[in-house]
Structure formats: structure tokens, C-alpha cells
Amino acid sequence: MSTLARLKDLALSESGFVFDPYTGATFTANATGLSVLRSLREGLSRPQIVERLRDEFHTDGAASHLDSDVGDFLRLLVQQALVPASWLSDVAPDATASQAAAGGVS
């Protein structure tokens, strides 16, 4: 089964309750987490998700900060075996440039 199909089969409630019908696992997500899950279900890339969050929640934060938060959430999804670890490497170009300028990326 593809990752996208598995994500589409997750039961998501507006209150943040998430149910994985394949494992029976449940967890909760806040509004931001739900937005990320819905974005992943639509097949959006990590940079597109960061842009959606910026628009949806009217944040003025730097792309690198949002990208870091999305990365943290993706790591949780990897731990729950909902997405493959390879999805963690999709770094937003703005975040990479910012980190390189700050000496964080070699």
C-alpha cells in the first residue's frame, strides 16, 4: 500500500482525533498538525506545506522556522510509521539558504 493511500485512509476529526485503521493506533493533533496531514494527503511537498501554513495561520515567521516545525511533525509521523523517513529530506529551498548563510549547512 502506498503512503499516500494510507494517509488518505486515516480518520481525521475536526477536534484533532486521528485514527489509523490499519494499526488501530490513535493520536491527537492540533490545528496545525491537521493542516499538515491534510496537505500530505493532497500530495503537497514540504515547501508547499510550509507555504500553506503561512497562509492559513497568517504567520509572519521565517520559512526556516515553519519548515523546522513541519520537520518535527514529520518525524513524529515517521515514528508512527505513517510516512517513510525519506520524506524528512524534502527541505524548503529558503530554509536551506538561510541555514547555509548562518553556517548551519555545509
Image (tube, helix red, strand yellow):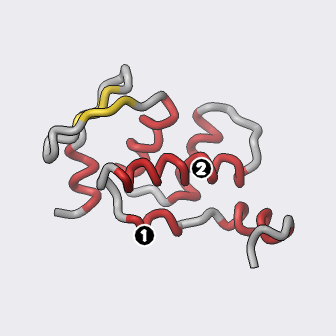
- Which tag, 2 or 1, sits closer to the chain's start? 2
Residue in the foreground of this view, choosing between 28 and 54: 28
Instruction: Identify the amino acid type marked 2.
Output: Val
- Look at 45% across and 56% down and name the residue there: 44
Disc 2 is placed on an element classified as helix
The residue identified by callout 2 is: 50
Disc 1 is placed on an element classified as helix
Q: Locate the C terminus by quadrant.
A: bottom right
Whether 57 is drawn above or below 106: the answer is above
Residue in the foreground of this view, choosing between 92 and 79: 79
Q: Position of residue 30 (x, y in %)?
A: 47, 28
The residue identified by callout 1 is: 86
Residue in the foreground of this view, choosing between 101 and 26: 26
Whether 95 is drawn above or below 66: the answer is below
Q: Locate the N terminus by quadrant.
A: bottom left
Q: Residue furthest front?
A: 79
- Look at 41% across and 65% down and name the residue there: 85
Residue 44 as seen in the image, left or right of residue 2: right
Crowding at label 1, few (<14), some or many (≥20) Cα neighbours within 10 Å?
Answer: few
Looking at the rendered structure, the number of numbered marks drawn on it comes to: 2
Residue 30 as seen in the image, left or right of residue 58: left
Q: Position of residue 99 (x, y in %)?
A: 77, 65
- Look at 21% across and 41% down and name the residue there: 20
> Which quadrant of the view contains residue 47?
bottom right
Callout 2 touching callout 1 (CB < 8 Å): no
Whether 96 is drawn above or below 19: the answer is below
Instruction: Identify the amino acid type marked 1.
Output: Ser
Q: Position of residue 90 (x, y in %)?
A: 53, 67
